Image (spheres, rainbow, N blue to C red):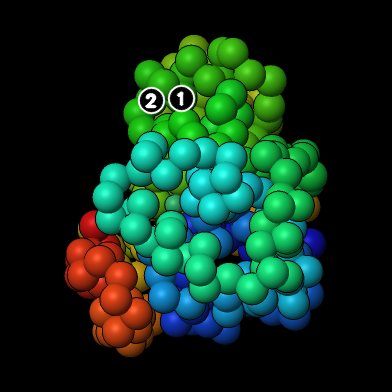
Amino acid sequence: MRVAILSDIHGNFDALQAVAQELSPNDEIVILGDIVGYGAEPERCVEWVREKKARATLGNHEACILGLFPVSWFNPFAASAILWTREHLGPGSLSFLGTLPLSFEDYGCLFVHGSPRSPVDEYITDPWQAREIFEEQDFSVCFFGHTHVAEGYVWDGKRTERIVFLDGGELLLEEGKRYLINCGSVGQPRDGNPKASFGLFFVEERRIVIQRVEYDVRAAARKILLAGLPEVLAYRLEVGG
Ligand code: ZN
C-alpha cells in the first residue's frame, strides 16, 4: 500500500495538479491541513480533496476561516488572504472544512498539521523542540506540516538527528527509532526550493520518499495578482521562501 502525503496546498491548484500527476489511482491520500489560504484557487483545491476522498486534518488557516482562531493571530498578508479566501469558498467547501479532525492515526502513524502536542498551531523547527515532543508524546511515527519545510527528526532514545530533504530524498524507518516527518508544502514551499513538495509512504516497506515537482509557478503567481491578493504572496512562490 502506498499513501501520498500532501500538506499546505494553500489554494495553489497549479502546484496541486503537478503533484496529482505523480500519483497513481490506487494511492491513498492524506492531507495535513492548510488546503486553502494564500493561493487564488481555494475552491478548486477543496473540491479536489473531496473528489479524491482524501483524509485531511485541520490546518491553522482552516481554523481561522471557521472562526476557531482570531484573524489577529496572523500577519497582515496572511490575514488578508484568509478574509479573501472565506469569501471565495462555497457553502459545501466550508462545511467540509468544518468536519476536519485535529489529527488521526492510521498505518501505525499519527497525522497532524502542527505538532502532536498542539495540533493546529505549533511549528516544529529544531531538534531540541523535537526531542521535547518525543519525550512528552506517545507516537512512533508522526507526519506533520505547517512549517512548509521538508525535513525530519529521528529519535533513537538518546539523541535527535535532523534530516533535510532539500531536493527530495528517501528514508527507511528503523525498528526501535521514532520519527517526526515533514513532507514539505505543495503550494508554498519555504525552504528555498520553489518546486512543490510531497511524500509517498510505502507502508509495508516502512519507506518514505519525499518528492519535489516542478510546476507553473508563474501561472499560480499571476492568479494571485489578478485576484487582488497581497503581491508578496505571488513573489514568494518564485523563490520558495
Ligand atoms: Zn501552511
- Up the image or down, 179 lies above or below 83; here it is above
Which quadrant holds the N terminus? Answer: bottom right
Relative side of 236 to 220, left or right = left
Q: Is residue 190 visible?
A: no
Q: Which residue is mark 1?
A: 130
Return the residue at label 2. 127
Give the image location of residue 72, x and y in percent. 37, 39
Depth check: give the residue in front, 236 or 171: 236
Instruction: Choose between 32 and 85: the one closer to the eye.
Output: 85
Label 1 with label 2: CB-CB less than 8 Å: yes
Tell me if the residue at label 2 has its CB under 8 Å from ligand 1.
no
- The residue that appears at 48% across and 15% down in the rendered structure is 132
Taking 107 as reference, is 47 above or below it? Answer: below
Q: Residues within 10 Å of mark 1 (few under 14, many from 20)?
A: many
CB of mark 1 near ligand 1 (< 8 Å):
no
User: Residue 102 at x, y = what percent?
Assistant: 67, 39
Q: Amino acid at mark 1?
A: Ala
Q: Position of residue 175 (x, y in %)?
A: 68, 31
Disc 1 to disc 2, how far (Cα)?
5 Å
Can residue 136 be seen in this snapshot? yes
Secondary structure state at the residue bearing disc 1: helix
